[in-house]
Structures are given as structure tokens and as C-alpha cells.
Amino acid sequence: MKIIFAGTPANAAATLQALLQGESGLNEVVAVLTRPDAPIGRKKILTPSPVAEVAEAAGIPVIKTKRVDSDTVQAIKDFEADLGVIVAYGALLGADALSSTAWGWINIHYSLLPLWRGAAPVQNCLLNGEKTTGVTVFQLDEGMDTGPVWLSVPAEVQPDENAGDLLRRLTALGISALMQVLPEIASGLRRPQAQVIGDEPLASKPTREAAKINFENSAVQIENQIRAFNPEPMAHALLSQTGESFRILAARALGATDWSSLGDGIDHKIGLVSIQKNRILVHCGQGTLLELKEVQPAGKKPMAASDWARGLQSEVIFQ
């Protein structure tokens, strides 16, 4: 089966690499579609996408474009692929593009569709405290992740996983699902099942504003926010003394607290940082505490919260 692959970031590159390594004469990746080179780092050096790097190393033709226009569609058609496989490409495919291969396009989505259709299923899963998630291989249509499903594979969300951790695990699960589905599609042994779409929430892309912590929320809500927005765009707060932005990379919710048990002079002031028995605690809404594990003050590298707290000279309150 001749395959054209579309994708851009690291998880898509891992999927492409698995496709290439899994080839045994049954599948052939004839071309790759990815986003153009982008400026990376402080020096803004133009750098190929992770998918482009894998494809170029393997000697596979690469089409780099921000949008799939008529010229791109024709370029895809010229490769006469049987099937398109897409993972986080970063642009929509219109009707012409969807019909540019003999059997259309399939997509790996990192949720159990129809739940969390959209750009950021992993972040929204964690933000909403979901305990289970999974991957879905489905046939692309012109809707937003609305096409019929070839295969869904569930997975448990681990208690300490952030979005980066969970995405890496779901990427591996998605690769396994793809490898199972491809021969079944080629042989006609599997048929996709239509989605039954109701009022499930959509997975909107997280913004920096959404990543700003409000300590009036409960510690559980804030922990979910921190996990969901690591590594992008990172949960953050402002230090009331300086107004500087302060990232919180990892934390744990402790729940409702008997404040009298913490010692004399401790009251529940929202956003206040307390150090109790070598634990760095922030007072949150609903009488809860958040234990800071890893932080990143402005202009500094990530560090253990305990190391940061040793340098404190005065009371710290988060806005």
C-alpha cells in the first residue's frame, strides 16, 4: 500500500518513523506533507519540522506548505498514493485534498471520539480531571474530527502525568493502533463505524491567558491546570511583591485543611506561600492547599520548589 504521510511536530515524527521501520513490503511511504521550516530559538534559525527531518533522512520527498491549496493537492495526486495518514499536520484538508488519494485519509486523534474533538484533546482531558482517555483512528471528512471510526483504544490517565507525559504515551498507543488498522483497511477486513455526536465539549487550543492561575480555585482545579499546560503554554502566576511572572511546573493538591494543625499564626490567606515541614504550600480556594514541586521563577531555569523557597527573604503571595 502506497501511503502519503502528513504531520509536523515530534509525536507525528515518531509515528512516521514507526511507519518507516514497520515497512516490510506491505506499506511504502511515498511522500510527506509538513509545515514549512520555522524560526527556532533566540537566534530564530530556520529549522525543518521534526517530520521533515525524519523524511529527509530517509530520502522521502517532502512537500512543505502552510495550506493545502490546489497546487499542493495536485502534487499529492502525482504520487498516486492509496491512503493518506495524518497526525497533527496543523492545517485543514478540504474536499479536493481528502479525495487526493484512492482511499482518502485517516487520522490519529488523542482522545476517544467524539469526546474532545479539536486541536488540544490531551490538554483538555487533563484540565477537566478526566481519569480515562485513549486514541482514535478515524476516516477524515470535512468536519472537525467527525469522520467514521476505524479503531478506538482506551487508556487510563496516570495521577502525576502532565500533557507532555500523556501525549508521549498516547503517541505510542496511536502507533500500535495504526499498525493494526492499516492491513485491515488494505484487506477490507474492517469497516469504520459512524460517530454518534452529541453535545460533547470541544478541545480548544490553550492560550496563555487560560494558563494564568487563579488561587481562588481549589487546589485540585489548579493541579489539573498545571498538568494540562505543561509543557505548553505553562501555568503561571504573578508574584505580588514584584509583579513578575512565575511558572509552576508540577504541584500536588492536598485537599481541605485544618489550619489550626499547621501551627500558631497560620491563617488561610489566598495565594500565601507557607513552608511547613519542608513542604512548600500555597493557600487556595475552598480551604485547600497546593504543594509546589517544581517551579521556574522569571529568568531562571526550572528548579525544585524547596530550592526556590530557601532563597526567600520575605512573605510571598501569589496574585
Image: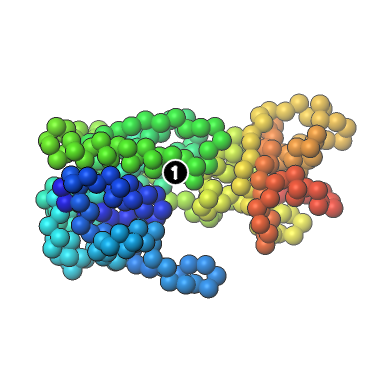
At x 43%, y 51%, the residue is 205
Establish if 50 lies above or below 121. Answer: below
Which percent across, then down, holds residue 68?
Answer: 24, 63
- Farthest residue in the right direction? 264
- Residue 315 visible to the viewer: yes
Residue 77, by quadrant, is bottom left
At x 51%, y 32%, the residue is 158
Establish if 117 lies above or below 237. Answer: above
Which percent across, then down, holds residue 39?
Answer: 45, 70
Q: Secondary structure at mark 1?
A: helix
In this image, 151 relative to 276: left or right? left
Query: What amino acid type should be assigned to the residue bearing mark 1?
Result: Arg
Classify 10 Å Cα crowding around label 1: few (below 14), some (14-19), many (20 and above).
Answer: some
Which percent across, then down, holds residue 159?
Answer: 54, 32
- Residue 115 visible to the viewer: no
Depth check: 270 or 75 in front? 75
Please name the colour scheme applied to the rendered image: rainbow
Depth check: 137 or 117 in front? 137
Q: Which residue is mark 1?
A: 168
